[in-house]
């Protein structure tokens, strides 16, 4: 089977097919495109067709490849962690705009936000928390590969940082409602990283109501949330006694991050 025949037989998006064939063959995507008439070795053909089968069944490309780029860094991912999304880069951008010395990342998953922040600002003290040990193992693996010093801790939300205060708290917590029909499209990703109760606000509610006790005076909290949740999140932050409550849109124009600060 030639390269062109294999790509045609894959039955998936052409760009994704090229990415998977490049992975199976060990060559670049550009080389795959240039070698359309080349015969594939049997082992490469078999590996590629197996990858294509997994993709046809809905498995995300990031899990098949075992990696995903986020904010200019490459992260290892597996089904224990949520795949980092481009819209979450807004959380990193907003965090980097603030002059802070210490950051707490809640629900770190693959470590995407914590590691992106540490990579851009090495002087930051970054503590990252997750309740899932498999996710923490992946985050630590990513930190080690990137040679970034992040303090990873196991536990639920603020549990592992009792008595500590930070200049900035960031979180991309679960915010999908339990009955959301879009969950079917996300069936390969960890449900505990997606679903937050009947209204999708369970995790956001818990974080917003407690965060003031973990912020230094003048410290900020930045929370990623879903479409249409911005008013509820702003109300939670204001109700917790925080000020300068604001929402920022992502590149698609969707209200994506809401934040506030503790009075100085």
Image (cartoon, grey):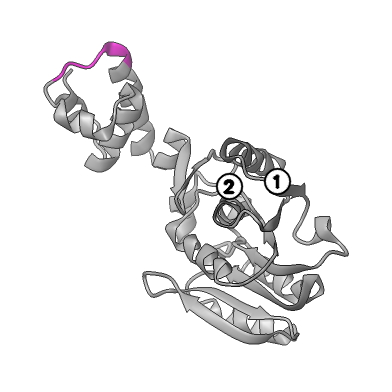
Q: Position of residue 88 (x, y in %)?
A: 50, 61
Residue situated in front as seen by the camera: 57 or 243: 243
> Can residue 78 be seen?
yes
Q: In the picture provided, is 34 more to the left or to the right than 219? A: left
Q: Quadrant of the N terminus?
A: top left
Q: Position of residue 202 (x, y in %)?
A: 67, 68
Q: Position of residue 111 (x, y in %)?
A: 61, 49
Residue stretch rendered in magenta on the structure: 38-43
Q: Position of residue 143 (x, y in %)?
A: 62, 42
Whichever of callouts 2 and 1 sits on the residue coming sooner in the sequence is 1
Determine whether 29 is above or below 246 in the image.
Answer: above
How many marks overall?
2
In the rendered image, the residue lying farthest to the front is 123
Mark linked to residue 132: 1
Query: Please, what secondary structure does the residue beneath circle 2 have?
Result: loop
Mark linked to residue 196: none
Say which of marks 2 and 1 sits in front.
1
């Amino acid at each position: 089977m030639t390269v062109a025949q294999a790509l045609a037989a894959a039955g998936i998006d052409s760009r994704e097919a090229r990415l998977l064939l490049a992975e199976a063959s060990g060559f670049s995507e550009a080389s795959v495109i240039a070698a359309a008439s080349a015969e594939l070795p049997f082992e490469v053909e078999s590996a590629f067709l197996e990858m294509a089968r997994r993709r046809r069944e809905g498995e995300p490309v990031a899990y098949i490849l075992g990696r995903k780029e986020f904010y200019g860094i490459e992260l290892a991912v597996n089904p224990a962690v949520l795949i980092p999304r481009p819209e979450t880069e807004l959380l990193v951008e907003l965090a980097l705009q603030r002059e802070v010395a210490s950051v707490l990342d809640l629900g770190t998953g693959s470590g995407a936000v914590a590691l992106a922040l540490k990579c851009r600002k090495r002087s930051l003290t970054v503590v990252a928390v997750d309740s899932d040990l498999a996710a923490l193992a992946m985050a630590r693996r990513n930190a080690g590969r990137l040679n970034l010093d992040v303090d990873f801790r196991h536990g639920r939300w603020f549990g592992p940082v009792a008595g500590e205060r930070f200049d900035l708290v960031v979180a991309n917590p679960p915010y999908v409602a339990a009955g959301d029909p879009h969950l079917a499209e996300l069936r390969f990703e960890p449900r505990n990283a997606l679903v937050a109760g009947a209204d999708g606000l369970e995790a956001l509610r818990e974080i917003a109501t407690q965060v003031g006790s973990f912020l230094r005076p003048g410290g900020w909290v930045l929370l990623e949330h879903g479409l249409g949740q911005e008013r509820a999140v702003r109300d939670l932050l204001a109700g917790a006694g925080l000020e300068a409550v604001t929402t920022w849109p992502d590149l698609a124009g969707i209200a994506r991050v809401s934040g506030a600060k503790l009075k100085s």
